[in-house]
Amino acid sequence: MAKIKGAVVVDVERCKGCNLCVVSCPSNVLALSKDANAKGYNYSNMADPDSCVGCAACAYVCPDACITVYKVRV
C-alpha cells in the first residue's frame, strides 16, 4: 500500500495569521512565520513538512480560503 504525503500551500499575501490552521493540524505541521506579509501579518507556513499527511484540516478551518492541500503517493 502506498504512503500518502501531504503538502500545504499557503497564499501568503491573503493569510492574516489567525492561527486557526496551526491549532487544527493533528500532525503539528504548521506554525506562524516570524516574517510578515505585505499587510504586516505573520502568515502560516509548513514548519515540519515531513509530518504532513494531507488531511486538509487546516484548509477546512481557514476563514479566508488561502490554504491548498495536495496529496502525493510516495
Image (cartoon, rainbow, N blue to C red):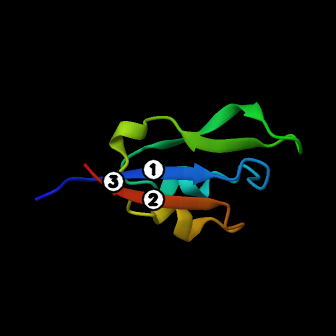
Three-letter amino acid code at the position of disc 2 = Tyr
* Residue 32: image tag: none
SS of the residue under disc 3: loop
SS of the residue under disc 1: strand
Q: Quadrant of residue 43?
A: top right
Q: Percent from the top left, x then y, of residue 55?
A: 38, 62
Numbered marks: total: 3
SS of the residue under disc 2: strand
Of residues 48 and 69, the one drawn nearer to the viewer in this rendering: 69
Q: Which residue is mark 2?
A: 70
Three-letter amino acid code at the position of disc 3 = Val
Q: Residue at x 20, y 53 (%)?
A: 3
- Of callouts 2 and 3, which one flags the residue occurring earlier in the amino acid sequence? 3
Pick out the residue farthest to the right.
39
* Quadrant (top left, top right, bottom left, bottom right) of the N terminus: bottom left
Q: Percent from the top left, x then y, of residue 37?
A: 81, 40
Q: Percent from the top left, x then y, of residue 73?
A: 27, 55
From the viewer's perspective, tell me whether residue 9 is left or right of residue 25.
right
Pointer 1 local density, CA inside 10 Å: few below 14, some 14–19, many at least 20: many
Q: Residue at x 77, y 52 (%)?
A: 16
* Residue 7: image tag: 1
* Residue 53: image tag: 3
Q: Percent from the top left, x then y, of residue 39?
A: 89, 45
**Vertical order, 62 against 19 (above or below):** below
Real-space CA distance between mark 1 and mark 3, rounded to the nearest whole angstrom: 8 Å
- Of callouts 2 and 1, which one flags the residue occurring earlier in the amino acid sequence? 1
**Vertical order, 15 against 65 (above or below):** above
Real-space CA distance between mark 2 and mark 1, rounded to the nearest whole angstrom: 5 Å
- Of callouts 1 and 3, which one flags the residue occurring earlier in the amino acid sequence? 1
